[in-house]
Amino acid sequence: MSKLSIKWLKRISFILILVLVSFSIATFASSAPKFGLPIDCKLGQDCYIMHYVDHDPTSKVIDFGCGRQTYDTHNGTDFGIPNLQIMQQGVQVKAIEDGIVLRVRDGVEDNLISNQEDKKAIEGKECGNGIVIKHEDGWESQYCHLKQNSIIVKNGMEVEKGTTLGMVGTSGLSSFPHVHLSLRQEGKIVDPFVGITDKTGCDITKKSLWEKKLDYTPTGLIEAGFASEIPTQQKLWEGQFYNLSINNKSPQLIFWIHAFGVLENDQESFQLINPNNQLIINQKKPINKSSRTWMSYAGKNNKSSLEKGTWIGKYQLMRNNKIVFNLERKITIN
């Protein structure tokens, strides 16, 4: 056989190997399981996705939708609820697929991490109260930040998809109530919005592993309502204004919103309408800095007494002259 023939045979063999490897990856990906949600809620109504998997291998960040709703090296998907008051009522964490419980940790206190001292106190327990479940074909799912003493499964237990594992909490390295879901295949992180891939960045083929279609929502509402004082994000996470009653002697009437994924140059507008249908506040302002979490408000001081009856707050977030979301909230002043 000539040297030229040998050379061509090597090239053909190399091409065949590449084709077979690609075919194997595609076949494996197509046979991957379809996963359920790790939380018992309705996305966009009483829960939301705060963070996605980081697809940028550098110190920069990018999520699968080419947005920035993630942070450096974040290896999972964060499903959040509005506040600690709802957390205390109990929101179930669910198994996303049939499997066997490999590891469990419970007993870590729920806390809202806000500074370096808090972070240092939970070193080695960043996942907080957590569970790892082994599934077929080398798949594993990990659930983090569950509520203290809420986990009801044990090592070695067989669980079915949808089995309640525990409750949403804020244990470990957590600054808001949520469950962090990490998905792994043979030890490698897999973004369930993308599927198995060896590529980085967001310009990639995406084959969702979710059982039901989940929309990419890089910006959205956490919660909105009224307060009798100027709110802070800490107080909003704590739920201090959740289902709050306000009387006509309150010193202030504040209409607030708590959101995620706002971008620099977004435009927000507030309206506050009194029980006589008079427009008391009509405020528009730009957002000057992009933020993964955002709190904003408008309101009035109560110089004498507030009109009794139903007050209406309206909010709208605009981006590039298009509505991102809008909402209306009402409160009855007694």
Image: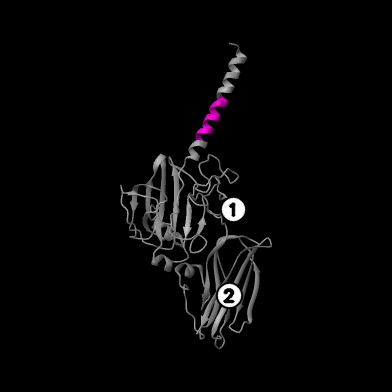
Bounds of the magenta span? 14-25
In the depicted view, which residue is nearer to us: 230 or 318?
Answer: 318
Q: State whether residue 237 is above or below residue 251.
A: above
Decide if residue 36 is in sight here: yes
Where 58 falls versus 44 (above or below)? above
- Read off the residue under disc 1: 67
SS at badge 2: strand
Question: Viewer-proximal residue, 99 or 155?
Answer: 99
**Residue occupying the far right of the picture:** 321
| CA distance separating discs 2 and 1 | 30 Å
**Residue 313 bears which disc, if any?**
2
Work out which residue is located at the far top of the displayed protein and give it: 1
Q: Residues within 10 Å of mark 1 (few under 14, many from 20)?
A: some
The percent position of residue 53, horizontal first and vertical second, equals 51, 50
Q: Nearer the viewer, residue 22 or 55?
A: 22
Report if residue 16 lies within the magenta region.
yes
Give the left or right position of residue 288, taking residue 131 as reference: right
Residue 260 appears in the picture as rendered: no
Please, what is the three-letter code of the amino acid marked with disc 2?
Gly
Q: Residues within 10 Å of mark 2 (few under 14, many from 20)?
A: many
In front of the other: label 2 or label 1? 2
Q: Secondary structure at mark 1?
A: loop
